[in-house]
Amino acid sequence: MKYQSQKVAKPYFIAALALFFGQIVFGLIAGLQYLHGTFLFPELPFDVAHMSHTNLLIVWLLMAFMGAAYFIVPEEAQTELYSPRLALVTFWVFLTAATLTIVAYLFVPYSHLAAITGNAALPTMGRGYLEQPLPTKIGIVLVALSLLFNVTMTLIKGRKTSINLILVGSLWGLALLFLPAFYFPTDTVKASFGWWWIVHGWVEGDWELILGALLGFILIKMTGVDREIVEKWLYIIVAMTLISGLIGIGHHYYYTGAPSYWIWLGSIFSALEPIPFILLIGFSFKMLMQRRREHPNKAAMLWALGTPVMAFLGAGLWGFMITLAPAQYYMHGTNFTAAHGHLAFFGAYAMISLSIISYAMPLLRGRTANSSAAQRWEMTGFWIMVLSMLGIALALTGAGIVTVILQRAADDPMGFMQVQDKARVFFWVREFAGVGFFIGLLVYLRSFFIAGEYEYASEMKQALAV
Amino acid sequence: MKLPQAFPLRPCTASWVVLLGLTTITFELGSGAPGQTLMAAVLALTLVKGQLVVSYFMGLRRVRPLWRLVMAAYLATVGGIIALAYLTA
Amino acid sequence: MHTETSVDSAQPLPGDFAIWIFIFAELAVFGVLFAAYAFARSAHVDLFNVSQLTLNRTYGFANTLVLVTSSYFVARATQSIKAGRGTACGNWLAGALVLGGMFLVLKLVEFHQDFAQGITLSTNLFYMFYLALTFFHFMHVVMGMVILAVVTYKAYAGRYSAANHTGVETGGSYWHMVDLVWIILFALVYVIH
């Protein structure tokens, strides 16, 4: 770790992992509530468990991205962060706001929360992922502005690399794309547009660029491949993301009251959205094959290779399944979407976050890589989480198939609750896989508590002895 | 295609003139009666024009055969799909 | 007079290889759009035939001539810089830019006429494709002109030479792609029926 100010990334990463843990706890609760609707009712009803699960996801990913920015920007710019103190203050503000918000979800009835936080003055509450009270939303904007100010000032005074420019540029995009959160018209068609500008704009656009920048940084550091080669790959990936994703947003407009030309434009362009993910796989494996060194952090390399593969499966493959208008006509809003959402969010954004944490955390703790024992625990955690998440996706896909057959495509459709009943076995499998995921998470977290750094000497001896 | 030494025009200039001519023919055919012959003719002309741009403007005449094949395959594929769609209309 | 000496048929693609990946990607996207148009038409032949007749083919023809000529100018620019003549290169590129600007103006006039007649993306399936395709291409002409403008500036500033002119070939290749796409588009949308 070359610059002292990179240290500020550490609290962000730690908080990210803690919030990730919280996210999964609520996920297990919500998953069980699919099967026993009155589990923990009325203290913790499903809607509260659900929004705690999703909101914690967003916050922990944002924490991870911010930590990544504070770690990467100084190193790429070859200068200390503009204001480490601002970064730390911002961290505490963000963590406090996030914690208070979750506590408020849990202990204050939602409508009352809306009343006491000024929702009547500027309504923003009540939409998925955007359930936060107005003060929290404003807090998010201020935290984002603080981050942007800090990293931009650092970038201005330092070396400008493609990675830096893409990362800082997309962080600006992230902040700007959040602004529609304050736009909540009564016209449901327009409200839907605004919602998707944030959600699609983030996860099928802006965040893909962040992923590319983070992956590029990790691969340059770990493989020693020429920066120029990495940069060329990134330009192409960025270009394909924008080409496919900008008009590809239309795949959310088919059946929401938008003009019908979106059926064509959305289908054609969103069909291309898997391409950047295919390129990311090619990119990471090509860099691996052309590597000039054997980096001792094997765990981080595993994360860096696993991320594009899982991202392609979740975002590219499962996404493609539901993207064409004729298919979506039957599958819209079913568990196909939930399967895609889980596998894509984890495969792309959770995994790239865990990748950068895997690479950076040992450095933040004063070593190049963790001990082999710690790395084994970490890699075991990786595999358990990856396989469990694939299990979750397959289970939810099964539930989705039941819905399409019995409720959407049938000549004599069954009612919603009847169909949910028929899909119970899949919800059990999902919960089971979810428990597996939680175990994987625990194994992964354990790895941070295994002492010691990479044993160069003994690993070298072993390698030579073979 | 190698032009004889005495030919007064550069290859790219000759291509340009041909392209202008083929474009004019395409335009004129546009006022013709609809039909498969017209469609086939215009499509063929278009692919020739495309190949001229690829060979002489992009300058791919001298590059590795792989790339020439890729571009030729692209034109053939797009032309083929269009022909297929129009024929099965 | 231009003579051809050795024919070395194993050269790499002109310019930076990365732009070619981008070019192939763009060609693929437009190819998909053309295919979509063709298949959409096959289900609505009469609608497409009738609506197509309302297009102003003369504008399309003029635009094709303009774009083909601008592509020719870019090819001449590349040849100039290969002979070490930076200013001549800049002049050819400037000419290409002027023609590119003419394309944009003609297209905007055509769009204005369309909108004045109340034609929008929602009018019918043919107009949806026509407007979407030509607008999408329009944006690529704009992008191509931005690239060419940068290259033109550098050419005039003497930043290229006979030995070092990758930028000219890179920017030029992109422009030729824009031209190639229009050639197909004009035939498909304006002419073939």
Image (cartoon, coloured by chain):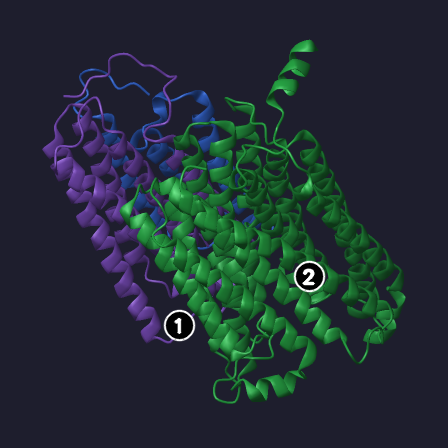
Q: Residue furthest top?
A: A465
Q: Would residue A378 appear left or right of C58 to someone viewing this image?
A: right
Residue A337 location, x and y as percent? 69, 61
Q: Nearer the viewer, residue B62 or A224?
A: A224
| Residue bearing the label numbered 1 | C119
Residue C44 location, x and y as percent? 56, 62
Instruction: Give the letter of the chain under mark 2.
Output: A
Q: Nearer the viewer, residue A257 or A140?
A: A140
Picture quarter containing residue A172? bottom left
Could you tell me how far apart the alpha carbons at marks 1 and 2 are, in whole angstroms? 53 Å
At mark 1, the secondary structure is loop
Residue C131 location, x and y as percent? 41, 62
| Residue bearing the label numbered 2 | A22
Q: Nearer the viewer, residue C137 or A42?
A: A42
Q: Specify the amino acid type for callout 2.
A: Gly
Instruction: Give the letter of the chain under mark 1.
Output: C
Q: Would residue C152 appear left or right of A101 to someone viewing this image?
A: left
What residue is rendered at 81% in x and 54% in y?
A435
At mark 2, the secondary structure is helix
The tint of chain C in the picture is purple
Q: Is residue C133 visible?
A: no
**Quadrant of the snapshot with the C terminus of chain A:** top right
> Any idea which chain is the blue one in this picture?
B
